[in-house]
Image (tube, helix red, strand yellow):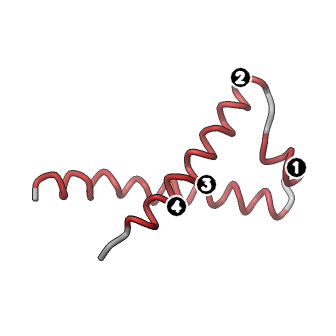
Amino acid sequence: MDTRGFDYTALTIVIIGAINWGLIGLLNFDLVSFLFGNMTWLSRVVYTLVGLSGLYLCSLFGRVSTMSHA
């Protein structure tokens, strides 16, 4: 099964989340709250997608080591 498209999508979402956390840490600026409001349903969806994408990418470690041994 080819999951490259889903992998890249999840990776993009996680990178966006990492940039947001970097902005929070460095500048005390929450980009998601700025764009979508403070804990509105839309900002909660964004935070949930970032978290689920991060959990999904944990499986990437097993798949990468399997692919490198093949």
Which amino acid type corresponds to the residue marked 3 in the rendered image?
Val
* Residue depicted at x 76% and y 59%: 44
At numbered mark 1, what does the secondary structure look like: helix, strand or loop?
Answer: loop
Among numbered discs 2 and 3, the one appearing first in the sequence: 2
How far apart marks 3 and 4 lie (CA) works out to 11 Å
Which amino acid type corresponds to the residue marked 1 in the rendered image?
Asn
Q: Position of residue 58 (x, y in %)?
A: 40, 53
Which amino acid type corresponds to the residue marked 2 in the rendered image?
Leu
Q: Position of residue 33 (x, y in %)?
A: 83, 46
**Dots 2 and 3: beta carbons under 8 Å?**
no
Instruction: Name the residue beneath numbered marker 3.
Output: 50
Among numbered discs 4 and 1, the one appearing first in the sequence: 4
How many marks are shown on the rendered structure? 4
Residue 16 located left or right of residue 2? right
How far apart marks 4 and 1 lie (CA) works out to 25 Å
Q: In the figure, 38 relative to 20: above or below? A: below
Mark whose residue sits in front, 2 or 4: 4
Residue 6 located left or right of residue 38? left
Mark whose residue sits in front, 4 or 1: 4
How far apart marks 2 and 3 lie (CA) works out to 20 Å
* Quadrant assignment for the N terminus: bottom left
Instruction: Name the residue beneath numbered marker 4.
Output: 9
Among numbered discs 2 and 1, the one appearing first in the sequence: 2
**Dots 2 and 1: beta carbons under 8 Å?**
no
Which amino acid type corresponds to the residue marked 4 in the rendered image?
Thr
Among numbered discs 2 and 4, the one appearing first in the sequence: 4
Mark whose residue sits in front, 3 or 4: 4
Q: Residue furthest right?
A: 37
Instruction: Name the residue beneath numbered marker 2.
Output: 26
Instruction: Name the residue beneath numbered marker 1.
Output: 38
Q: Residues within 10 Å of mark 4 (few under 14, many from 20)?
A: few
